Amino acid sequence: MQLAEMGDQHSGASGQQGFPRDRRLLKTDEYSSVFNFRCSQGGSFCRVYARPNTLANARLGIVVGKRELRTAVARNLAKRTVRELFRLHQADLAALDFVVRIVKPFGKSDVLLVREELLRLLHKSKRCQKS
């Protein structure tokens, strides 16, 4: 990442490009409420659960199990990929709480496929708003 990009990423002026705490699911109850709502979309690498929230913006939670991705390097790559995609597209997403669960291992060579799939699933999850 170049220095100019890093400066833009952390600038507080726009507020739309960061990933602050108010855009994250933090508590177990928040995750449970999304899972219990039972509205999900599945793909080959991940499954996206969604639930409407009362906020003006989308929030994200990530679940990556050791069973699916055995090494910490692989789990961190998965989480970075999901967070980065959410960060870049959060303005386009509906006011939903999303939980992304990784269901199949992937490596660096598959990151573009995972991003495309995840973006498609996040936008498909708008259906959960009407439930």
Image (cartoon, rainbow, N blue to C red):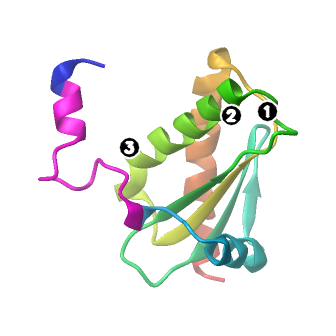
Identify which amino acid the numbered label 2 is placed on. Arg
Front residue of 91/127: it is 91
Image disc number at residue 69? 1
Magenta span: predominant SS is loop
* Label 1: few (<14), some (14–19) or many (≥20) C-alpha neighbours in 10 Å: some
Mark 3 / mark 2, whichever is N-terminal: 2
CA–CA distance in space, label 3 to label 1: 24 Å
Q: Secondary structure at mark 1?
A: loop
- Where is residue 96? Give x, y as percent: 52, 71
Q: In terms of image quadrants, where is residue 103?
A: top right
Front residue of 51/10: it is 10
Q: Secondary structure at mark 2?
A: helix
Identify which amino acid the numbered label 3 is placed on. Leu
- Where is residue 79? Give x, y as percent: 59, 40
In the rendered image, the vertical position of residue 130 relative to residue 103, given as above or below? below
Q: Is residue 77 left or right of residue 4?
A: right
What is the magenta range?
5-22
Which residue is located at x 48 percent, y 62 percent?
24
Image disc number at residue 75? 2
Looking at the image, do the residues carrying marks 1 and 2 touch, with CB atoms under 8 Å apart?
yes
